Amino acid sequence: MSSCGPPQSIHPLSGPRDSVIDKRLLGAWGNRRDTLKIGFSDTPVMVFSWTTYKNEKSSETEEISLTAFVTKIGRDNMLNLRFQTPTDSTSIEQEHYMFGKYKFLTANTLRIWIMDDAEVERAIDFGLLRGEVTVGKELFSSKNVLITDTSQNIVAFIQQARTRALF
């Protein structure tokens, strides 16, 4: 059974005030299928505007807006990502964070990895992280993985985990 998306967390890795501003992220990034535009003002919170094709065979695109800020964990650059939704929305998703790791492979090549749901689910099952795994009631339903642990414990888990498997 697959997950409905990347694992989410009720806590960020750090607060936006503790984050670093990485001006190298600013600009437009893309490949054949996706375009990611990143901008921010004088605060560490960035706005990601991601345009992607709905599926590999479609020419129809969808736009996803996220807010993000950077947390440094050792030598790794981590992203705290949230869906940007209208302020009148009551969606729980807007309150949760997703985590990514990014690296500049060259000055013009940005690589972003999103945290793996199966690895986080295993960590929750083994008691390495506090969290919940819920399964929908439909026949082909998917799992949702929610980290409920503290920011400090999530950071400690990332530092101890095999990052290649986690991201």
Image (tube, rainbow, N blue to C red):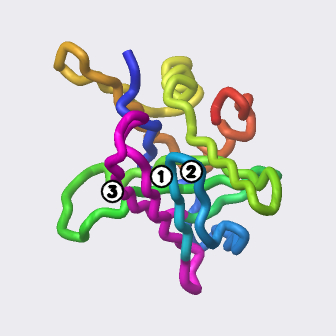
- In primary-sequence order, the first of circles 2 and 1 is 1
**Which residue in the structure is indicated by mark 2?**
151
The picture quadrant where one finds residue 146 is top left
Q: Which residue is mark 3?
A: 94
Question: Is-magenta flag for residue 65?
Answer: yes
Between residue 64 and residue 119, name the one nearer to us. Answer: 64
Q: Whole-percent x and y of residue 40? A: 55, 78
Residues at circles 2 and 1 in contact by the CB criterion of under 8 Å: yes
| Residue 151, percent from left and from top | 56, 50
Within 10 Å of the Cα at label 1, are there few (<14), some (14-19), or many (20+) other Cα atoms? some
Specify whether 112 is left or right of 132: right
Highlighted range, magenta: 40-68
Of the 4 image quadrants, the one containing the C terminus is top right
> Depth-wise, is mark 3 or mark 1 nearer the camera?
3
Q: Secondary structure at mark 1?
A: loop
**Disc 3/disc 2 C-alpha distance (Å):** 18 Å
Q: Which residue is mark 1?
A: 11
Q: Is residue 88 above or below residue 138?
A: below
Please name which of the two marks, 3 or 2, marks the residue nearer to the observer: 3
Quarter of the figure with residue 159:
top right
The residue at 18%/68% (across/down) is: 88
Q: Position of residue 119 (x, y in %)?
A: 57, 25
Q: Amino acid at mark 2?
A: Ser
Which secondary structure, mark 3? helix
Q: Residue at x 54, y 20 (%)?
A: 122
Q: Please state, as top left, top right, bottom left or bottom right, where the N terminus lies in the image.
A: top left
